[in-house]
Image (spheres, rainbow, N blue to C red):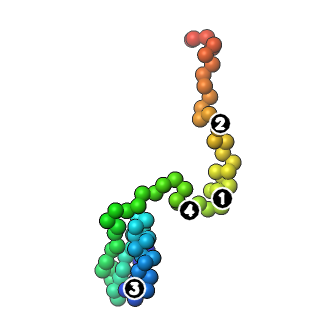
Amino acid sequence: MILNLAAARDRLSECVARAENGEEVVIERHGTPVVRLVATNPKKFRFGTIPLTEAQRAQLAQVDWDAPAFPAPDPFAPIP
């Protein structure tokens, strides 16, 4: 996120929240970057905190989460 100084002043809370979430926030003066906001202890992403698109939600809804990742070998199959 890149903002000029006036916009950053008006939206300071939003800028701080975005920096806390790991987003890079750059503040410019007269078109020249002068400040980059960085969180001292950035929040860690947890499962479910990243916004998904509708297509991604639909794709996840179709997954059979109870199915095995790979088929188990047949214990009675002859050894080659």
Is there CB contact under 8 Å for labels 1 and 3? no
Q: Is residue 55 above or below residue 20?
A: above
Task: Report which residue position mark 3 lands on.
Answer: 9
- Identified at 60% across, 25% down, the residue is 72
Left or right, 34 with reference to 62: left
**Residue 58 % position (x, y):** 68, 55
Q: Marks 1/3: CA distance?
A: 36 Å
Dot 1 alpha-carbon crowd within 10 angstroms: few under 14, some 14 to 19, many 20 or more: few
The location of residue 63, given as percent across then percent down, is 66, 45
- Of tags 1 and 3, the one toward the viewer is 3
Secondary structure beneath dot 1 equals: helix
Discs 4, 1 touching: Cβ within 8 Å: no
Tag 3 or tag 1, which sits nearer the N-term? 3
Can the viewer see residue 17? yes
**Which mark is drawn over residue 55?**
1
Drawn side of residue 55 relative to residue 11, left or right: right
Q: Secondary structure at mark 4?
A: loop
* Mark 2: amino acid: Ala
Is 6 or 12 nearer to us in this picture? 12
Structural distance between the alpha carbons of marks 3 and 4: 27 Å
Please give the label number shown on residue 67.
2
Q: Quadrant of residue 34?
A: bottom left
Instruction: Residue at 56%, 62% (x, y): give it.
Output: 51
Of pointers 3 and 4, the one earlier in the residue sequence: 3
In the rendered view, would you say 15 is above or below 48?
A: below
- Tell me the amino acid under the disc marked 3: Arg
| Closer to the camera in the image, 53 or 40 | 40
**Badge 3, how many Cα within 10 Å: few under 14, some, many 20+?**
few
Three-letter amino acid code at the position of disc 4: Pro
Mark with earlier residue (3, 2):
3
Q: Distance between the Cα atoms at labels 1 and 2? A: 22 Å
Q: Which residue is mark 4?
A: 51
